[in-house]
Amino acid sequence: QTGTTTSTSKVQLTKEEALIAGNFEKNKGRLPWPVEKGYISGKYGVQPHPVLEHVTINNKGIHIKTNANSDARAVFEGEVTQCFSIPGSNNAVIIRHGNYRTVYANLTSIYVKVGDKVTPKQKIGRIYTDPEDDNNTELQFQVWKDKSTENPSLWLAR
């Protein structure tokens, strides 16, 4: 019964998954960036909308601006659990690291498939470059622990 959910929504981890989760947790603030070069262009959490007055947005992750034709990279060893299309926002990949998950969204091509084991800095997909927005290339990156989001900028190496 690996990865099954009990009535309290707590995920039961195998020994290997618990080890990976523990190692993931120990690397808070030290994970490699999910892009080779880039900067945080959208912060985590509730903030004013960039254009609309009196409107707030709740960003469940961060946005990382990078160069055109860049690839998203896994930030830690893990297993690909989902690859899917988001209407109006291209594709996304979810990688499980024990009871942690990282989400990589706004991808045009995906280089991995469900069940793949990935290593840190492994390329997992091409980030969408918007030709109608000055070639803006932005990865949406999230970190989840169980069912709640974490601030990804606190997990990445400075």
Image (cartoon, rainbow, N blue to C red):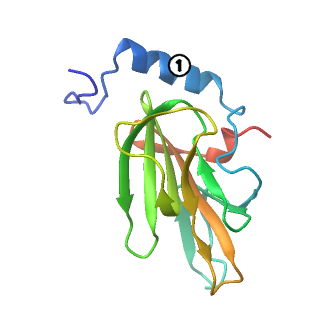
Q: Residue at x 69, y 44 (%)?
A: 33
Q: Residue at x 62, y 55 (%)?
A: 71
Residue 157 location (% of width, % of height): 75, 37
Q: Is residue 156 above or below residue 1?
A: below
Q: Residue at x 30, y 22 (%)?
A: 12
Q: Name the residue at the top extreme.
A: 15
Q: Nearer the viewer, residue 55 or 85?
A: 85
Residue 127 location (% of width, % of height): 58, 62
Left or right of residue 94, residue 107 in this image: right
Q: Nearer the viewer, residue 89 or 36?
A: 36
Q: Nearer the viewer, residue 9 or 67?
A: 67
Left or right of residue 74, residue 83 in this image: left
Q: Name the residue at the right extreme.
A: 158
Q: Secondary structure at mark 1?
A: helix
Q: Is residue 112 above or below residue 87?
A: above
Q: Quadrant of the C terminus?
A: top right
Label 1: few (<14), some (14–19) or many (≥20) C-alpha neighbours in 10 Å: some
The type of residue carrying mark 1 is Gly
Residue 94 location (% of width, % of height): 43, 46
